Every structure is written in C-alpha cells, then in structure tokens.
Amino acid sequence: MTFMFHHSGLFKKSIDGDMIYEPDNMKVLMGVDRDTLDVFFVRGYYKELGYIKAGNCWWKTPKVFLSSGLRSLVIDVDLLATCKECRRNQHVINIYLENCISQPCIVDNMDEDVVNVEAESSKQKNSSQAKKYHSEPTKMPTTSHPQSNKQTPQPTKPTSQPNKPTVKPNFQPKKTNYKAQFSAH
C-alpha cells in the first residue's frame, strides 16, 4: 500500500464553493505492509514530517469530492475501512493531517536570527556550541539557558528520620474480669 500524507494545510472553500486543502504539502510513503499496520502508526506519522503535534487525522474515500469524502481516522476499525477502500484507488490512501504544529522558531529580538544549540561530542560533555542560522524553520531548535556553576551545599545531617514501627513480640491483650467490675457496684 502507498500512503499520500497531505500536511500543513487547512480545509477551505474555493472560489467555486468546493472544499480544498491548502497549501497542500504531500509526502508519499510506499511499501506499507497492511498486516503490520495500525492506527497509531498512521496517526503518529506527523512526527516523521517534522511536527510536534497534530490534530485531526482524515482519510479520503477514493473518487469522491473532498467535501463529502473525508472520513475520520481514529481507531483501527477506521483504518480497516481505509484499507478496504484503497483497492479502488490503486492501493493509494490519501491521509489529511489537520492542525499540525511545527516546532516554534526561537528568535533573538536583537537580530532576529534563530539560535540552534547543538551538543558537542561526548569527549566535551560540559560544553556546548551555539550556531546561528538565518530565520527559517527548523525541526528541533533548542536554546541554552545559562546555569550557575555554584554548588549547593549538601546537608550534613538528614533533615528527618524515617519512622520505625515498634513491634511488641507476642502481644496478648489484657484479660479483664467483667464479672468483678459489675459486681462491685
């Protein structure tokens, strides 16, 4: 099977009144084995496309307009229906991802460049190198927050001791002579 992922667009009405998905960025995933396929793979594919979050996931019924052919893809039963219908479309399944959120670009207010911090090799664990790129989206930009090298003092004594339960061996309840208590009155 082949999946055609339509991503980073919105459903809109065209000038003619038809529903469209725009801008329509597409990613083709070929050779998917239907026997090992599950809904989590399809719904989670947004991560492979560079998004950190996706909203609704839809599949389109083959040979039907977008406005009436969209079906929700939430559970495995939906995916089974998708696989059944894909035979009518040369084994191609059109998946539409809605409300995809990319990793936000962190922009320096001074020169509006994106700061991307990459960790150096394991030989230099304690240092990091900052590289500046022109303002264009990246998949996973990170920033470095300066941390003080000040060591916090360790307490010399524990602040509290764990509770130790006291166990009395062979505890026997005290026998009370109720007859003697009531006859004395």
Image: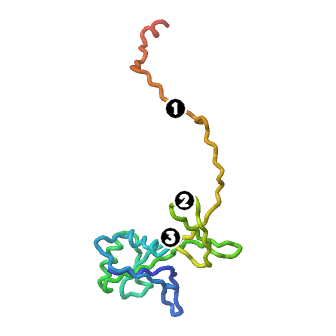
The mark closer to the camera, 2 or 3, is 2
Q: Choose the circle earlier in sequence order: 2 or 1.
A: 2
Q: Choose the circle earlier in sequence order: 2 or 3.
A: 3
12, above or below 181, in the image: below
- Spatial CA distance of label 2 from label 3 is 31 Å
168, above or below 96, in the image: above
Q: Where is mark 1, residue-wise? A: 163
- Spatial CA distance of label 1 from label 3 is 46 Å
Q: On the image, which quarter does residue 129 sit in?
A: bottom right
Residue 170 or residue 104, whichever sits in front: 104
Element under disc 2? loop
Residue 125's disc is 2
Element under disc 1? loop
Question: Image check: 31 left or right of 47?
Answer: left
Residue 58 rendering spot, x and y as whole percentages:
42, 77
Q: Tell me the kind of residue under disc 3.
A: Lys
Q: Where is mark 3, residue-wise? A: 53
121, above or below 155, in the image: below
Q: Tell me the kind of residue under disc 2.
A: Lys
Q: Residues within 10 Å of mark 3 (few under 14, many from 20)?
A: some
Q: Choose the circle earlier in sequence order: 1 or 3.
A: 3
What residue do we see at 57% from left, 35% from top?
160
Residue 160 or residue 55, whichever sits in front: 160
Residue 59 or residue 5, whichever sits in front: 5
Residue 147 rendering spot, x and y as whole percentages:
64, 57
Question: Image check: 71 left or right of 143?
Answer: left
